[in-house]
Amino acid sequence: MENEISEFRVFGKNIEIISVYYGLFLILWGFITSFLAKSSSLTSYIPTFLGLFVLVFSSLSIKFQSKKKLFMHIVAFLGLIIFLGGLDVIRLIIKKNLFSNFWADISKIMMLFTGIVFLILCFKSFKFARKSLTENSN
């Protein structure tokens, strides 16, 4: 069929493009929140560093299609690290210390929620690819 979708898409974008956007978002987030918080701490740039890696590996998956699976698994692993980093919010809630450092805590909440959404999209994409592979081999 001509109209058959050959890859997982969200809002018309494939997971590699979504990953590029997510990487850019994280990079900008780190710079903007560090600026707003007037922070000189390297830890305020954690989203930027992670976003840089997401951007690099998702870009590599676009450029080197033969290695796309490897690079996108690395990107998904980075998404897991982002999500796990955001889970520190639970510790802050338990200690009743949430928002003692407003911008740092907002960044953790952002990482928690965007990380889990990104991971879900990655899993859906991998599942779609696996299903397509088995359907095409029959």
Image (tube, grey):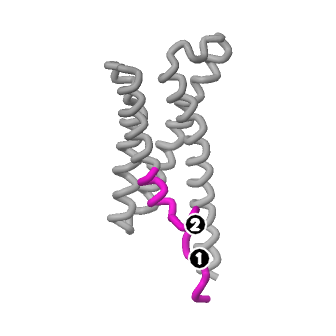
Query: The C terminus is located in which quarter?
Result: bottom right
Quadrant for residue 116, please give it: top right
Residue occupying the point 38% across, 36% down: 48
Residue occupying the point 36% across, 20% down: 38
14 relative position to 67: left or right: right
Quadrant for residue 34, please give it: top left
Instruction: Find numbered disc 1 in the image and state the secondary structure of the residue it sits on.
Output: loop
63 relative position to 29: left or right: left
Task: Tell me if mark 1 has few (under 14), some (14-19) or many (20+) residues whose alpha carbon lies within 10 angstroms of its own.
Answer: few
- Identity of the amino acid at label 2? Phe
Asked if residue 97 is among those painted magenta in the image, a careful observer would answer no
Q: Which stretch is magenta?
A: 1-21
Q: Position of residue 127 (x, y in %)?
A: 62, 61
Residue occupying the point 39% across, 23% down: 43
Asked if residue 11 is among those painted magenta in the image, a careful observer would answer yes
Look at mark 1 in the image and give the residue it sits on: 5
Q: Position of residue 45 (x, y in %)?
A: 37, 29
- Identity of the amino acid at label 1? Ile
Instruction: Find numbered disc 2 in the image and state the secondary structure of the residue it sits on.
Output: loop
Q: Which mark is residue 132?
A: none
Vertical comparison of 85 with 52: above or below = above
Look at mark 2 in the image and give the residue it sits on: 8
